[in-house]
Amino acid sequence: MARGAEEETVAWRYFCRDVMPFAAMVLVECVTVGSNTLFKAATLRGLSFYVFVFYTYVVGTLVLLPLSLIFGRSTRLPPAKSPLFFKIFLLAFLGFMVGIIGAKGIEYSSPTLSSAISNLTPAFTFTLAVIFRMEQVVLRSSSTQAKIIGTIVSISGALVV
């Protein structure tokens, strides 16, 4: 009986550590593509993109708020001071503007192009990290080689589309 419970624990750890992140990435990509396609269909029928972005934020809030209450932190939060509020405001503003700009871009192009461009995010992140010296490029390192190959593959994939 103890061996079965131990095997179940190992299987659960494997599932949480290896399978869940991959499944979450696939789910996020599917939701993004679905949202872009839904947005294009809604705007072709006359829905304002401001309203669609608002609905997107409402759905995001309704999904994430209960999850944050269920899986909340067990540690204390940092003290509420003005630099923290400034960072929260800046991130919220940038997130909102990216949503508006992305929606306006989809209005003028196709959801396929939007999905291809969103796949460039890791490449841009790595490139900016190298430019701002937050990432060191050691060509003999396997992790650096994987990042460079991933950047080249994601840019090549976006160019093919």
Image: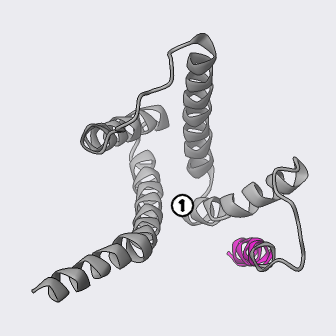
Q: Is residue 30 left or right of residue 114?
A: left
Q: Is residue 66 left or right of residue 153?
A: left
Which residue does the numbered mark 1 point to in the structure image?
Answer: 111
Q: Quadrant of residue 48?
A: top left
Q: Where residue 149 sits in the image (x, y, percent)?
A: 77, 79
Residue at image location 43% in from the left, 76% down from the top: 18
Residue at image location 47% in from the left, 65% down from the top: 29
Residue that protrudes farthest toward the top in the picture: 82
Q: Is residue 88 left or right of residue 138?
A: left
Which three-letter amino acid code belongs to the residue tagged 1?
Pro
Query: Which quadrant is the C terminus positioned in?
Result: bottom right
In the image shown, does 74 or 113 lie closer to the viewer?
Answer: 74
**Most prominent secondary structure in the magenta stretch?**
helix
Whether the magenta-drawn stretch holds residue 122 is answered as: no
Query: Which quadrant is the N terminus positioned in?
Result: bottom left
Q: Quadrant of residue 77?
A: top left
Q: Where residue 50 sits in the image (x, y, percent)?
A: 47, 32
- Seen in the picture, residue 67 relative to 126 is either above or below; the reply is above
Element under label 1?
Answer: helix
Residue at image location 34% in from the left, 35% down from the top: 58
Residue that protrudes farthest toward the left in the picture: 1
Whether the magenta-drawn stretch holds residue 160 is answered as: yes
Q: Residues within 10 Å of mark 1 (few under 14, many from 20)?
A: many
- Seen in the picture, residue 17 relative to 6 is either above or below; the reply is above
In the image shown, does 66 or 61 lie closer to the viewer?
Answer: 66
Residue at image location 82% in from the left, 58% down from the top: 127
In the image shown, does 68 or 102 lie closer to the viewer?
Answer: 68
Q: Where residue 40 sits in the image (x, y, percent)?
A: 47, 53
Magenta residues (range): 146-161
